[in-house]
Amino acid sequence: MQRRLQNINYLDVVLWLIRVAIIVFVLWGTIATLRENPYSSRNWIDFIVLGIAQGSMYALIAIGYTLVYGVLFMINFAHGEFFMSGIMTATVFIAGPLDASGYMNKHPILSLLLILLVAMLTSVGVALLTERVAYRPLRKAPRLVPLITAIGASFFLQYTFRGLYGSEVKPFPVINILSGKIPFLGTEILRSQMVVIVVTIFMLIGLYLFIMRSKTGKAIRAVAEDKDVAALMGIDVDRTIAITFALGASMAGAAGVLYALVFRQVHFFMGFLPGLKAFTAAVLGGIGSIPGAAIGGLFLGIFESVGPPLFLDGLNVPAYHQLKDVITFTLLVLILIFRPQGILGERLGEKKA
Amino acid sequence: MQTVKSFTLRNAVIYGLQAGLITTLISMVGMVELFSKRQIVTGVMTTAQVFILLAPALFSYLTARQAQKNNSLLFSSVTGFTSSLPMILLVLLATIFNLREYLVNVSPTLIATLTFGQGAILGSIILAVVTTILGFVSAWLFGLDDKFRKPILTGIMWTLLVGIFSEILQERLRAFFGRSFTSLIIKSKALNPVVAVILLIAIITLTYFWQQRGDSIKQRFANRFVGQQSNKAFYQRIALFALLLILPLLLGTYLSEVVNNVGIFVLMGLGLNIVVGFAGLLDLGYVAFFAIGAYVMAILTSEGALGIADTSFWLALPVSVLAAVIAGLLLGTPVLRMRGDYLAIVTLGFGEIIRIMAGSDTLKSYIGGAQGILQIPKPVFFSITLLKPGQLYYIILIGVLLAWFISTRLSNSRLGRQWMAMREDEDVAEAMGINLVNTKLLAFAIGAGFSGLAGAIFASKLTSIFPYSFDLLKSINVLSLIIVGGIGSLPGVVVGAFILVGLPEILREFAEFRLWMYGALLIVMMLAKPEGFWPSAIQKRELHASDENVTTEEQAAAD
């Protein structure tokens, strides 16, 4: 007993040392930056708006992780690929030809809706197929098994789409009404970023209402609570899980379109990093919670765009802008180590993690 | 399995469509076209055709297995026929529309391969006829007595394999038997048709007789060693060791290089096997330790601007391993309390952090940023510089044997059993008095040490290292190979490395589809053979026990 106590203390000491070191590092960097003050307040607002736009996309993707984790307690590693598959297909089959024929700029709203529809449907199709082939047969298997198939599915999908559409970066056409800036609260923001933020807000509200008010939403919540009891209450568990995957994938498909609007290019590998970051966002907000995913996404987006200049610039870290992803991954690691229940603290004891 | 009650025509059609869709996907991502140049039998058969016909044959065989005996021939033919429909649809669509504008790999070559070069209409008919016959033949094969079926299947399989690898075989045969003899057997990188037929018949007869007489021969052989079991194992080991020693002489430069690459992955695999297989800690950032080993070796020995010490390979080697072990302890400590998938994601995060840091300009003045470190000398052994793959082989061999020795000794030691107890249930293990902190840290440290060793050898083998050699894909690579070989099984690591690393290097067409194949393999292995190709005894027993539960439940759900 004595020995065990000592061991736990040693671990706690290490963890506390890490905590203190990080707090000191962040505070020191922030104070140093603020003292030098290399950025104007205008810069900071730009950083924050960019962060919100980025974070909206993360939020939409994070919904998929959270929903699936909620019902299956499984990290759907392939979710980033659902995001990629939709917009890749829509770009190749819809956006490219529409732009070439000039239809895109004549009827931009209609074209965008068509692109959105195709992207969402493709993502949903890919998700349902993946769920059916790679996850459903393994529902009773040990926990690591579905994670491994998810990793497999992720790479399989990436390279399938690479094989289908080619490995080069594909340009997403410029839409005239979405280029340029509009004034907003005394500053100017990009129209595309505005669209991203507005669309995200509507989709999140819609999803929240669907989960909370509709009968299907109720079934999803019941399955998340307890699959066996839900089955006893007459809920088709397999179908509900499939619907959950479809919901998450449709959000990811929409996020893909928003991504393409902002960055104007698509690529078969584009799902990996946003997927991982959205997972970070989901964990940050408290995995399993939908408002958590939204908050986590926004927080991560802002953190990522404000973080590097705020923490690292003042410390004279060379080439700090290349370390954006390092900050995200560090945040991911730190949350998982120190607060795996996230900001909103959904119930998630050590048992389930 | 044979007693599935209601296998109807509908099921046969569904099987056929599935097979057809799989084949169409394989065609559309470009695999078929890529392999259309690699012939198996000169002028008769290419690897691409095997790829097209594999899924229909397999699914027809499955149909035959599940259908009732009296109509299995019909059902399998139906499966074979329907499997051609998606492909024919693709052919027709591609002839009517210019699909290539959207799907880059639907090329004229692909269509020509699918239609046997006979044009869309005639070709489609031929394709349908061929798959139907294939379905019929599969069912007929299934209906045959075991006595004949096994030799025939073995014969077909080995002839195809020899044909696929004929290019590399040709090179080796030339080295040993000269040009004129080789050109008799292998013509323009594929088997001579006559030789192919002879080979097929020879293998079938040999397998047939081995099946009939093999047991008695084995028995006679075993009788000579009665009471000398340990002696027999000893001789086997000596023979294996001798083979390993002269391997580079047999293989030649190119194959030695392939074996070296496999060896480095075996070394990493043995390390990850301790972490994932023995201790059950899924580590997705395993490449980080490989990177640390490589970078330490590079910085210590490089003759370029970034080298700081100019030490020899032998001096730098233990330092690299030590650095990796320390890194294993450092990264292992904060994650001690995590389990399962969260652990996987955190380690993935660590791996990515290290890779991005290595590639960024932040640390450029120390480790070279994206330009990496150059001018790393090759190892020198008593004033002989080990330049050739055949020489470097021995260093890798020693490393692998060392890691193998440590792994076998550990697996049955007190520590190994603690790991396995922890893998099964951490709480119970802790209650049994196992010190989780030490046990986990030791797993991380030893695994990291092997990986660091592999990285150090890798650095001096390539003489230059770049951050992109250390991305997540490498971790996935190593994870895949231990899963394919069998989690927790040492021979499995070697088997997995040869399948996943060696094969794509010999069949260079695979290179582009390596990860595609890995992804598919991970899923298929988990679904069909979760214990791997060469499972450890424990794993096999466990997974089969749980398998039975799953299949019965699945059947219940299906009914």
Image: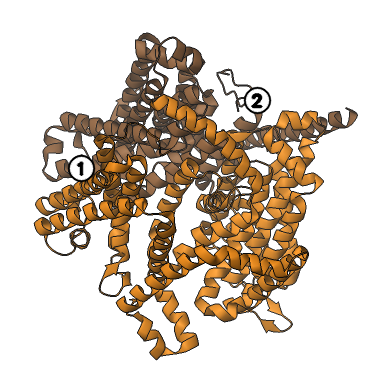
Chain colours: A brown, B orange
Does any portion of residue A297 appear in the rendered image? Answer: no
Distance in Å between CA atoms under marks 2 and 1: 46 Å
Residue A62 placed where, x, y %? 44, 29
Taking the image as shown, residue B207 lies to the left or right of residue B75, namely right
Taking the image as shown, residue A319 lies to the left or right of residue A63, namely right
Front residue (pair A298, B475): B475
Farthest right residue in view: A2
Residue A271 placed where, x, y %? 40, 41
Q: Residues within 10 Å of mark 1 (few under 14, many from 20)?
A: some
Task: Name the image quarter holding residue A217.
Answer: top left
Which residue lies under the disc numbered 2? A350
Does any portion of residue B244 appear in the rendered image? Answer: yes
Residue at 49% across, 42% down: B526
Quarter of the C terminus of chain A within the rendering:
top right
Residue at 35% across, 74% down: B196
- From this view, report whether residue B250 is shown above or below residue B23: below
Residue A49 placed where, x, y %? 41, 29
Residue at 38% across, 66% down: B160
Amino acid found under the numbered disc labelled 1:
Phe
Task: Name the image quarter holding residue B366.
Answer: bottom right
Amino acid found under the numbered disc labelled 2:
Glu
Which residue lies under the disc numbered 1? A93
